[in-house]
């Protein structure tokens, strides 16, 4: 239990609210983890450091092996810790404000974390009469020490149930009507887990099935193999999404919609997310190894590239969209490898350009949704880049159409289709769909991800069905 015997204390910088100490009243002592915050402060600090400096993961791992004291020292020296981006429990904060309104002092206390972290939180919130943290050799602040003497006269404690309280202290029930409903052990619902894994994004992995269709491999065994390959990519992609959410947790909390993601909102703790990520990776690798060693190699390449994207590449203008296009195309390549057919150069080129177009549309939508003069978080773009992004997206989209027309005229088509000339009827449909996506992005009718938009759009499904019917007729 953190008491006034801590070696590091400090004023809470509460401004006028610090006058509450002059009016007396029974103090309220608030702990940090799972009380003031929805998650663990150490995990927040760790991922904040890794997000800004991926290489720091090695030093942090070494600090963990050396013991808690070394990890605490390493986190305290972080230059990237930002208390404004933490997931504070709003009900706890509201309760502290009510206590201050009653004329009672409120203290932030931790016997786990260094004064640098605890002090930064206290300074940011600005509602604490004073704060106290674990020892780091700093000298005592006389004024803060004077304030903390009132603790020996008894106080109310809002914190962990396992803490042993001294005589005169009263534990506030964590689910009482007068206190906030802070961290509980209630199990997380399946909908929250589905949101974390982004199960709705698994539809993208149907791209693994494309080579089976274009190569006319309609047998039962190729179909089963392709489905297992798609499942492996789905599990691997979900693991990558979790890693991305862990790295981007600070930026997500400042985003209008992404702040509702399970990790950013505090619905799922980082430790739980990491455990889920490990299980997903084990499942993906196991299934991929069963499909074939070559397919496992492609999946490993995909995971390596998406990890690089999460840590660095997504912050580099244009290189980020090229990476997204490659990640989508790798799914198609993986489908060919899984069923043992040669990857069509035409399909490869078409995939690169069409997914480059969709990635650029995604960036265009993000830029369009930012207010004028803003710079999107974690992106190396500026608002006035929108016009160029739109031009590049249209160019990439119609280059994909050109590649498709050249494919129709190639010898490869004649070997697969009895009436290849019928396939020309699909070109206007494809041109219409590409132009429609660009137009809808310009009108602000696409919400963030054009791939998800296409999966939900009836016209897109109608276009896909029409092209599929034309391809069947051409056979």
Image (tube, rainbow, N blue to C red):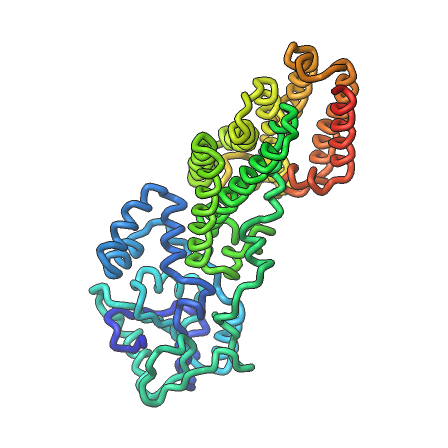
Residue visible at 45% across and 72% down in the picture: 16
Residue 63 shown left or right of residue 104 in the figure: left
Instruction: Reply above or below: 336 against 169.
Output: above
Q: Nearer the viewer, residue 185 or 137?
A: 185
Q: Nearer the viewer, residue 353 or 118?
A: 353
What is the residue that sits farthest to the front in this orientation? 220
Q: Nearer the viewer, residue 386 or 472?
A: 472
Q: Quadrant of the C terminus?
A: top right
Instruction: Reply above or below: 162 against 342.
Output: below
Residue visible at 52% across and 32% down in the picture: 327
Residue 114 lies, in percent from the top left, at 29, 63
Residue 397 lies, in percent from the top left, at 66, 24
User: In this orientation, does residue 386 appear?
Assistant: no
Residue 407 lies, in percent from the top left, at 66, 15
Residue 378 shown left or right of residue 45 in the figure: right
Quarter location, residue 421 = top right
User: In this orientation, does residue 136 appear?
Assistant: yes
Residue 212 lies, in percent from the top left, at 61, 29
């Amino acid at each position: 239990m953190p008491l006034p015997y801590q070696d590091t204390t400090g004023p809470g910088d509460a401004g006028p609210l610090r006058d509450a100490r002059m009016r007396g009243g029974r103090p309220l002592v608030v702990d940090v983890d799972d009380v003031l915050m929805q998650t663990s402060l150490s995990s927040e600090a760790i991922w904040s450091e890794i997000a800004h400096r991926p290489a720091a993961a090695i030093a942090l791992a070494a600090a963990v092996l050396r013991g808690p004291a070394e990890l605490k020292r390493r986190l305290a020296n972080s230059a990237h810790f930002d208390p404004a981006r933490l997931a504070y429990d709003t009900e706890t904060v509201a309760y502290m404000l009510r206590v201050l309104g009653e004329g009672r002092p409120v203290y932030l206390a931790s016997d786990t974390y260094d004064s640098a972290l605890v002090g930064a939180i206290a300074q940011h919130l600005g509602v604490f009469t004073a704060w106290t943290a674990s020892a780091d050799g700093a000298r005592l602040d006389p004024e803060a020490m004077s304030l903390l003497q009132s603790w020996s006269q008894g106080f109310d404690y809002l914190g962990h149930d396992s803490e042993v309280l001294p005589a005169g202290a009263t534990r506030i029930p964590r689910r009482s009507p007068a206190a906030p409903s802070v961290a509980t052990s209630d199990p997380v619902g399946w909908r929250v887990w589905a949101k974390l894994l982004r199960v709705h994004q698994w539809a993208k992995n149907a791209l693994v099935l494309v080579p089976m269709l274009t190569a006319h491999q309609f047998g039962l065994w190729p179909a089963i193999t392709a489905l297992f390959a798609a499942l492996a990519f789905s599990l691997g992609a979900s693991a990558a999404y979790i890693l991305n959410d862990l790295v981007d947790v600070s930026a997500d909390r400042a985003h209008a919609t992404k702040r509702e993601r399970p990790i950013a909102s505090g619905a799922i703790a980082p430790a739980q997310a990491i455990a889920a990520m490990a299980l997903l990776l084990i499942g993906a690798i196991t299934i991929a190894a069963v499909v074939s060693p070559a397919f496992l190699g492609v999946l490993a390449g995909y995971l390596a590239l998406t990890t690089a994207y999460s840590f660095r590449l997504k912050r580099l203008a244009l290189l980020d969209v090229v990476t997204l296009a490659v990640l989508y195309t790798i799914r198609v390549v993986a489908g060919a490898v899984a069923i043992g057919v040669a990857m069509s150069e035409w399909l490869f080129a078409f995939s690169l350009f069409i997914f480059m177009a969709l990635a650029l549309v995604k960036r265009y939508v993000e830029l369009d949704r930012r207010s004028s003069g803003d710079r999107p978080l974690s992106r190396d773009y500026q608002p006035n880049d929108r016009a160029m992004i739109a031009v590049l997206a249209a160019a990439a989209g119609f280059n994909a159409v050109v590649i498709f027309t050249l494919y129709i005229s190639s010898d490869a088509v004649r070997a697969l289709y009895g009436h290849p000339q019928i396939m020309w009827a699909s070109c206007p449909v494809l041109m219409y769909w590409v132009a429609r996506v660009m137009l809808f992005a310009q009108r602000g009718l696409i919400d963030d991800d054009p791939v998800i938009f296409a999966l939900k759009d009836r016209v897109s499904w109608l276009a896909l069905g029409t092209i599929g019917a034309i391809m069947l007729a051409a056979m």
